[in-house]
Image (cartoon, rainbow, N blue to C red):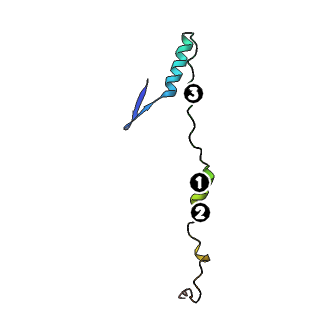
Amino acid sequence: MRQTTAGHRVFEDAYTDALAKIIESKREDKPLPEAPEPEQPGKVLDLMSALTESVQPTFPPAATITPPMGECLPHRAE
């Protein structure tokens, strides 16, 4: 098993280990090792809908806000 460290994490290089086993089996004319069962994939996210939701405004634009009846918007000083 080959392991390398990157900072405080330990990384196990499963791909290189599996490839080394295949090469060794072929050199010695042995049958290839069995492939492990694939893990269940994680939840797949729809990135476009997540992006669309993240940019939706949470408040209505200022132009659509109307004052209550009887009140006026302040005038700009010119």
Query: Mark 3 or mark 2: which is in front?
Result: 3
**Residue with the most extreme top position:** 29
Q: Amino acid at mark 3?
A: Glu
26 or 50, nearer to the observer? 50
Query: Mark 3 or mark 1: which is in front?
Result: 3
Q: Which residue is mark 1?
A: 50
Proximity of marks 1 and 2: CB atoms separated by less than 8 Å: no
Question: Which class describes the residues within 10 Å of circle 1: few (<14), some (14-19), or many (20+)?
Answer: few
Mark number displayed over residue 56: 2
In this rendering, the answer to whether 33 lies above or below 15 is above
In this rendering, the answer to whether 46 lies above or below 15 is below
Q: Is residue 14 left or right of residue 41?
A: left
Distance Cα–Cα, label 3 vs label 1: 31 Å
The quadrant of the picture occupied by the N terminus is top left
Residue 41: x, y in percent? 57, 37
Quadrant position of residue 55: bottom right
Q: Which residue is mark 3?
A: 37
